[in-house]
């Protein structure tokens, strides 16, 4: 939430637009200077709008808000720099959603450690036309992360990330192994 900023001067002071008859009136000048305190942050935001829309430059509260635009859920466990990376790459990750490389890259953004994703496949074919396809078995994914100390790894956070990234019908297993 943007609010007043102590010491921020307005680039367009209201006293400069007072009619000449009021420009010499001390009360009128002090009265409209109150509007400068309210308008200065608005002018500053509008003058820097492109920076507010860039996850790498935006204030922290705006990064969380930008995340709602691109489907990055708010998670207080995420470090600010990690949240910035997630928001910045969300469109690309959405384009590759459902692929092994997309899932690998999304998980790697959350855990900052080597990630391996093994997919069960799910494609099947038959060499005989008109025959039923062989059953490929249930769709499943194994996510393997390598860490220095598995006892300190936040397994619950990774579980939430993987569950959110996979389709509901795909089972998953998480393996945290010592590097």
Image (cartoon, rainbow, N blue to C red):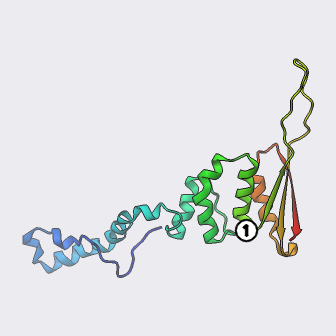
Q: Residue at x 35, y 82 (%)?
A: 7
Horizontal arrangement in the rendering, residue 62 relative to residue 105 (left or right): left
Q: Is residue 133 above or below residue 61?
A: above
Secondary structure of the residue carrying numbered label 1: loop
Camera-nearest residue between 83 and 143: 143
Q: Residue at x 61, y 51 (%)?
A: 92
Residue at the outermost front position: 127
Horizontal arrangement in the rendering, residue 57 relative to residue 133 (left or right): left
Residue at the outermost left position: 21
Q: Quadrant of residue 144?
A: bottom right
Camera-nearest residue between 38 and 155: 155
Residue 128 % position (x, y)? 91, 21
Residue 34 % position (x, y)? 28, 75
Q: Is residue 86 above or below residue 59?
A: above
The quadrant of the picture occupied by the C terminus is bottom right
Residue 8 % position (x, y)? 34, 78
Q: Mark 1 sits on what residue?
A: 112
Q: Residue at x 12, y 77 (%)?
A: 25
Q: Quadrant of residue 43?
A: bottom left
Q: Residue at x 30, y 77 (%)?
A: 9
């Amino acid at each position: 939430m943007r609010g007043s900023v102590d010491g921020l001067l307005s680039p367009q002071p209201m006293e400069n637009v007072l009619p000449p008859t009021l420009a010499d009136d001390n009360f009128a000048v002090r009265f409209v200077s109150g509007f400068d305190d309210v308008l200065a942050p608005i002018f500053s935001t509008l003058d820097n709008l492109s920076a507010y829309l860039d996850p790498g430059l935006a204030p922290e509260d705006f990064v969380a808000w930008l995340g709602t635009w691109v489907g990055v859920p708010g998670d207080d466990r995420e470090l600010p720099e990690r949240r910035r990376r997630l928001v910045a790459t969300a469109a690309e990750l959405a384009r590759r959603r459902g692929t092994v490389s997309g899932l690998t890259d999304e998980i790697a953004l959350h855990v900052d450690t080597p990630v391996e994703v093994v997919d069960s496949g799910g494609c099947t074919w038959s060499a005989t036309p008109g025959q039923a396809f062989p059953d490929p078995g249930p769709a499943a994914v194994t996510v393997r992360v390598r860490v220095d100390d598995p006892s300190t790894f936040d397994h619950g956070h990774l579980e939430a990330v993987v569950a959110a990234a996979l389709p509901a019908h795909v089972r998953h297993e998480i393996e945290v192994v010592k590097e």
